[in-house]
Image (cartoon, helix red, strand yellow):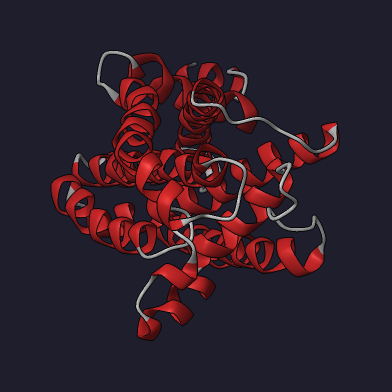
Amino acid sequence: MSLLTVASRPRIGAAAQWWVLTSRLIRPSWRNGELVTAVVAPTVFTLGFYVPLNLVMSVYGHGLSSYAQFLMPMIVMQAVAFCATSAAFRAASDAKDGLTVRFGSMPMPATAPLAARVTAAMYRAVVSLAVAVLCGLVIGVRFYGSWWHTAGFMALSLLIALSFCLGADLIGSLAKSPEAITQALIFPQLILGLVSTGIAPAHQFPSWLQLFARNQPVSQFVYGLRALAGDPSGNAGVVGWPVLGPGLAWAVGILVVFGALSAVVAMRRTG
């Protein structure tokens, strides 16, 4: 009789399982500070860099109509970088607590927990992006392109966020140490952020560092976002493949590589 009862129970669909796991991560985000960090991070970065550097960069030059316009893409980059760090922390916490192994033994798609974690991370990224844009508007940033340029700015920002969060989730799930992975991700975030064209033009770096500062992934993301935001000076870059292509290639490449590796890891844990 019990076997018939079990057999007659309706199977929960993959979409419902994904939503339950996603809700598990989104609901407590205010209490555990994850959403607060998503709001505070772009605000602190805006104040921390715009206020002290505005006058300095006005003297040394940045090529655009205002330093706020120049800095805006970097505010977005820092916002999504902090969301990626939170994604790594969450993945490492689930692995440390044994939830990843437990989910792997349950009758659900192997990638459902991964999809839920990434969805929750993107939820925080959307909030952080909105706050970053608001901070930019407060310091004088404006979008000078067409409506589709502005939509492209938001879409590229979210694509970058997705690639960062997916990569960070994989690193966190493999590391299994929330504290260690958070500290480990801060270093590349600082290096790639500070040695990029998001804060200062490439020619203001030492000559031996200019090639790296100009061509590293964060700088390529910044070039694309800056062109999509536009500027009255005409120096923000032309929206086209030569400017957008390298950043898009980096984002898609990170997404494909880490997405495939994440899927492989998830499948092996259910095997």
Most extreme residue toward the bottom is: 208
Give the residue at x 25% y 53%.
Answer: 186
Q: Is residue 105 visible?
A: no
Give the residue at x 80% y 55%.
Answer: 239
Give the residue at x 79% y 58%.
Answer: 238
Q: Nearer the viewer, residue 216 or 214?
A: 214
* Residue 47 picture location, percent across and down: 33, 30
Give the residue at x 35% y 78%.
Answer: 206
> Which quadrant is home to the C terminus?
bottom left
* Residue 18 picture location, percent across and down: 55, 30
Q: Is residue 32 above or below residue 246?
A: above
* Residue 104 picture location, percent across and down: 40, 46
Q: How many marks?
A: 0
Q: Is residue 88 above or below residue 123?
A: below
Q: Nearer the viewer, residue 253 or 134?
A: 134
Quarter residue 44 falls in: top left
Q: Nearer the viewer, residue 90 or 81?
A: 81
